[in-house]
Amino acid sequence: MEVSSPRFAGPDRGTAGDGRRKAAPPLGAHAPSVSLPLRFVLTGLLALFLGVAGLVLRPELLATYHYNQHVVAVTHLFTLGFITSIIMGAMYQLVPVALETRLYSERLARWQFLFHFVGFVGMVGMFWTWNLKQVGHFGSVMAVGVGLFVYNIARTLRRVPRWNVIATAVASALGWLSLAVLAGLAVAAGKCTYEGAPQSAAAQSVAPVLAGLRATADFLSRFDPMSTMHAHAHLGGAGFFLLLIIGVSYKLVPMFTLSELRSERRARWSVALLNLGLAGSFFAILLRSPLKPLCALVVIAGLAVYGVEMRAILRARRRRALDWGLRYFLTAISLLGLLALLALVLSWPKLPLTAFTGQLENLYGFLALIGVVGLAILGMLYKILPFLVWYARYSREIGRGRVPALADLYSPRLQVAGYWTYLGGLAATSIAIVLGSTKLMPWGCGLLALSILFFAVNAGRMLSHLVRPKVEPLAFRMPVKPGANANPNVRPRFTSAGTGAASQTLLS
Amino acid sequence: METETAARVTEAQVWNALHQVIDPEIGCNIVDLGLVYHVAIAGSRVSVAMTLTTPGCPMHESIAQGVQNALLCLEDVDDVDVQIVWDPPWSPAMMTDRGRASVGIA
């Protein structure tokens, strides 16, 4: 019999002579303190709201070709501010839990938040004003943060007792993230000029760095600027975000539906094909190679295998009803089918470079970031945020008072309303992008903003439990110790001494 | 489900207390979920063998702590031993009808 055995003793009691008793393990042995992921999540939500509000106020951003300073700024607000912030916070929380290990260093993670926040805010601001030298500086600050993050998670992964496909996917995603950041810094370096640099005294002390930047710029000048930008975006979007969503879903979807991974081999194949296809696509995009559709097909094959495994997991689920958080997530990954089709069309070498093609590229980016990743994140946030709040506020109260379940922390009606308005917003904005319509765009983005507002209200409800917990008295039917309740405001009810009959009623 | 010895705290009281502990993700108490496999009482010490719906459940420690809290609330319980076991693995067949109905499990 496989047993893990936490043993508990009353708080003031000593160790028994048999030596078998030990102190209760601290709560949260696998997870960091709640304030750590929460700061990332709240930062991400704020960035999402600002980004969507920006699209409502500036509808022309998605109705014109994406290679301009404002679109690049808003894109980085979504990718770094919204998506990466939330993913980082969630990974600090979930990777130790999902892989049954401990976070390597919470202190490093706190420092990383500072680098990340300063870095992405500065980058977005500097992109908006198209000051690429400062983009490079703030990007370097963020890169330090990413380095700390990758190091921390990589050291955490080294502690994993049993390496599995989820760990492989997470490790792959970290690799893609590192490459995306390096590629981004290289793109920024390639867009700067260095003629005046050697003349300043300060520059002499960093001459090797400048030489490296100049060499990077010279190297990148061999490639088409649009291709380098698309290759960089591909590393971040398809590499980091997609691999992570897929890897994490192999753990979370079975967990939330009471199912299990049906074929580890199939899951490994999906991750391997995705990694192979993504690596090939990176070079194909960078070199404008005619092999782009072939690489896209390898990625699509990986997605198809993933789809087959996900379908098998869902078919074997023991919890038939899918909650709305999962519906958000599953809808998001269903959109991968549409995205894959679009990717195949856009990878076609003979595709004419018309304004309509440009709008299709905008649609691809929008559906990838706001459709697939955004919706998946909102769905998972309906799991993660209640968990964080519950863990912080109620994990010590459970068994001492009647605590709410996770689903009691927010309004299901708002959750459902948020789902449909988000889908409506996605559909309307997608049509507006394809048509290049600045009239329809605010309506679509407005629906998205409304959906996010619904989520914000629900998030406020969840967070309110941190300051106003709702613990009710237990329905004990037997004598309890005086002061046994943790919450001084909660006293157990003394109804009657426990009897078999009473218990039978409860157990029936 | 068995009791080892007669004790001041009764098995019925222990089961009643365990009813107060919920799995917060599923929103059902651990007894109706069928997570509790065995309860043993020896004097003022209670041992509980239980499982979780899935290995690596993020609520693992909270639920085990909840069992400890609920049982240590009982007047005649001074020591609680919670064993998390994975054999046999949990399945919905272990749930009571009420538990199954409350969480929508087929």
Image: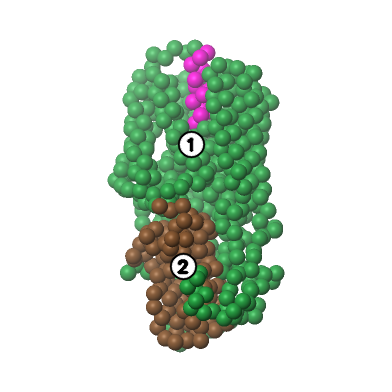
At horizontal 58% and vertical 50% (from top left) the residue drawn is: A385
From the image, tell me which residue sits under label 2.
A508
- Residue A396, located in which quarter of the rendered image? bottom right
Please name the color used to draw chain B: brown
Residue B105's place in the image compared with A120, above or below, is: below
Q: Nearer the viewer, mark 2 or mark 1?
A: 2
Residue A49, can we see it? yes
- Residue A99, located in which quarter of the rendered image? bottom left
Please name the color used to draw chain A: green
Q: What crowding class fits label 1: few (fewer than 14 Cα within 10 Å), some (14-19), or many (20 or more)? A: many
| Residue placed most toward the observer, A114 or B25 | B25
At horizontal 67% and vertical 31% (from top left) the residue drawn is: A53
Q: Are marks 2 and 1 on the same chain?
A: yes
Please report contact status of discs 2 and 1: CB closer than 8 Å, yes or no: no
Q: Main secondary structure of the magenta part?
A: helix
Residue B75's place in the image compared with A365, above or below, is: below
Q: What crowding class fits label 2: few (fewer than 14 Cα within 10 Å), some (14-19), or many (20 or more)? A: few
Residue A135, can we see it? no
Q: Is residue A367 rendered magenta in the image? A: yes
Q: Amino acid at mark 1?
A: Ala
Q: Residue furthest left?
A: A265
Residue A168's place in the image compared with A188, above or below, is: below
From the image, tell me which residue sits under label 1.
A332
Please state the extent of the stretch shown in magenta in the rendering.
A355-368
Mark 2 chain = A
Q: Position of residue A362 (x, y in %)?
A: 53, 23
